[in-house]
Image (cartoon, rainbow, N blue to C red):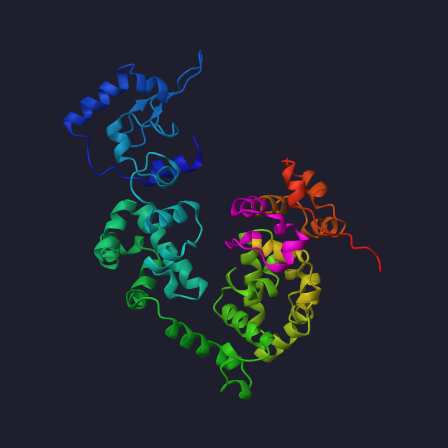
Amino acid sequence: MQPADLVLKRTRAVHEDLTAEEEILAESQDHLPTMELSMNNHSKQGEDLIEDECFVCMRMTVRRCSSCNKYALCSMSCEKKFDYVHHTISCPSTKRPIDSTDYLHLAVLEDMLPDDPKTCDDFGFSCFWDSRDRTRLFGLYVGLLNYLKVPSRTVAKWLEEGTLNENIVREYDAIPERSRGSYYPWFLEHRHIIEKGVNDDDLVTRSIEKIEPYLDPGDKMVDLGNCQPEQKRQGYFVFICGLNHSHPPITREEWYFFGFCTTVDDYSEGQLGGLYADLVHRCRFTEFWQAYAQGKLIALMDRKGFGKVRQPFRHLETFLSTFRDGMKHSVWQLVWFCRGEETEAPPCLLVDYGFLHCETALDRMQLKDTYRELLQKCDPLELHGACVKGKTYQFASKYLKLEKRFQRLMKNPYPLPEM
């Protein structure tokens, strides 16, 4: 049994008993050797059927979901009741649309803050810039779904009715105070912010109040979010993020220019964000943005005592020290493009990585997916080395089994002839 299945056993609560009619139906489908049951278990000749507990009523059964064949469900009645989020999202039999509550439930099971924009808006995460506050709010929902065992569809109903916060209070107030944890008192203190909804002006005001002690007198009267030079404006956004224990999203240019493209996954991206958060709390804003503009952020990190902390971020020093974008290798733009949701490649990738040869949207999508998979297996700078030699396809073929057409798609004019 998979770990996620065990979590489900512990966290799902069955609130309604089967009616007598459903029990008869379940019993009949458990024991009658119907065509559906035979097909449902897709046993090869001679293969034993594996008996397991039904995920809904806990009866022992060999029956599986009639559509995806993955989960033990003893009857069509139980199958209709079963609403495990992984099953809901992946099973072809799902009749209802996937909604923000499903994504919240999935985030809770995977112990990862939700990143779906609608989920963040619906459940209040967008009201907080500080990642610590978002983590506390997430902990509240973990308690609601995992420990208080409120079904996700019940939460969806509250959301639809506009009674989410009232019902959260009712559920937590129903248990002893000593069992409520620290996230619920925090929720009561910040409930008014969530109920007010997302307000960009409020977020900006709170951020300005945080950064003011770090500003020189001349900057306190300046709209730093729209100032020049652009390095100062970019530095302002990252500084604000750091003060809020957050980091730029991948949709912002600062994600690229401050080296988040050199991280290997979401975890290391968060670690780099933590490094910047610690750094901005130890320096003045002018000191920070000027170090960035001069390609001296690494020296600033070392001077402020973060030399060992930044060392695990491979290629970060090389990337940040090349402070002029025209001198940065285009492979980092490729990383940015592949990690994001954009469908149109930036100009530098059209020639270097072959997107110019893509004749259809499907070609672009498949080439992007191929590079995304490749970058999970290789060092980006080794890919760059192959690119400038005109050997991208040969290099990629060492890691992936590629169709022959990718040789044409990955073709570039390198190496350039010597003048």
The residue closer to the viewer here, 235 or 185, is 235
Residue occupying the point 44% across, 62% down: 132
Residue at the spot 62% in from the left edge and 58% down from the top edge: 333
Seen in the image, is 267 located left or right of residue 415?
left
Residue 217, percent from left and from top: 54, 88
Rendering coords of residue 112 (x, y %): 45, 51
For this view, does 322 lie left or right of residue 130?
right
- Which image quarter is the C terminus in? bottom right
Query: Relative to 79, is 110 above or below?
Result: below
Residue 35 percent across, percent down from the top left: 31, 16
Horizontal and vertical percent position of residue 308 = 67, 61
Task: Report which quarter residue 407 is drawn in.
Answer: top right
Overall secondary structure of the magenta stretch? helix
In this rendering, the answer to whether 4 lies above or below 307 is above
Q: Is residue 121 visible?
A: yes
The answer to whether 250 appears left or right of 181 in the picture is right
Q: Is residue 354 magenta?
A: yes
In the foreground, 392 or 154: 392
The residue range painted magenta reads 338-367
Image-based side of 321 in relation to 131, left or right: right
Q: Residue at x 23, y 50 (%)?
A: 157
